[in-house]
Amino acid sequence: MLPPDLNDSARWMLRSVFGQGALTLVMAAWMTAVRMPAMKRAGLSLQDAAHTSVLPTRLPSSATRVADNYRHLSEQPTVFYAVALGIVLAGLADPTYAACSWLYLGSRVAHSIVQATFNRVALRAALYTVSWIALAIMIIRPIISWHLI
């Protein structure tokens, strides 16, 4: 249960943070479910994955693009986690921040689905841009409101 002193916007932001965590968990499971059988079909052992950089040359794209997406979820989303939690902890959460956090999550979910399935780079790039716009608003808005620039 969330602390009772959080406003509704803060609660919605925290839900989006946990949603992003859940997306990462789902992609980890998907990666494992796809990669392990692909490795077996390719005659690879777990030890052969000691250096994952060699796997793309030995596994089909359908196996490597899910792993690529999982790796991407350890990049930009870490900034989202920090910024969203900072907004909540600073007591700044409002409907605009909450909307941005959900726009961020939605665009990352869509990005993951696109990358892990049909992998249209132009669509992925558009979704990536949308996620960065939402995140940029979350980063810049408190800086401006605190007159730090």
Image (cartoon, helix red, strand yellow):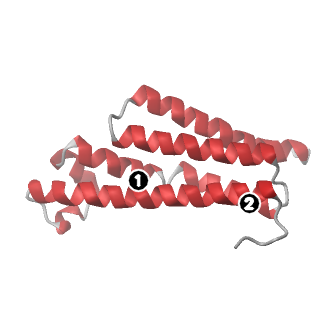
Q: Tell which circle, 2 or 1, labels the residue nearer the N-terminal end.
A: 2
- Horizontal relation, residue 127 to residue 56: left or right: right
- The amino acid pointed to by label 1 is Tyr
Residue 75 percent coordinates (x, y): 51, 52
Regarding residue 12, the answer to whether it shows in the image is yes
Of residues 135 and 8, which is closer to you in this image? 8
Please report contact status of discs 2 and 1: CB closer than 8 Å, yes or no.
Answer: no
Q: Quadrant of the C terminus?
A: top right
Secondary structure type for disc 2: helix
In this view, which residue lies farthest toward the top? 122
Q: Which residue is mark 2?
A: 11
Q: How dense is the environment of label 2, judged by Cα within 10 Å: few (below 14), some, or many (20 and up)?
A: some
Query: In which quadrant of the rendered view does residue 114 lie?
Result: top left
Regarding residue 139, the answer to whether it shows in the image is no
Secondary structure type for disc 1: helix
The residue positioned 78% from the left and 43% from the top of the image is 96
- Residue depth check, mark 2 versus mark 1: number of the one nearer the observer: 2
- Image position of 36 with respect to 128: above or below: below
The residue positioned 53% from the left and 60% from the top of the image is 21
- Horizontal relation, residue 140 to residue 42: left or right: right
- Horizontal relation, residue 73 to residue 33: left or right: right
- Horizontal relation, residue 36 to residue 134: left or right: left
The residue positioned 85% from the left and 60% from the top of the image is 91
Distance (Cα) linking label 2 and label 1: 26 Å
Q: How dense is the environment of label 1, judged by Cα within 10 Å: few (below 14), some, or many (20 and up)?
A: many
- The amino acid pointed to by label 2 is Arg
Q: Which residue is mark 1?
A: 70
- In this figure, what is the number of numbered marks? 2
Query: In which quadrant of the rendered view does residue 115 lie?
Result: top left
Residue 43 percent coordinates (x, y): 8, 58
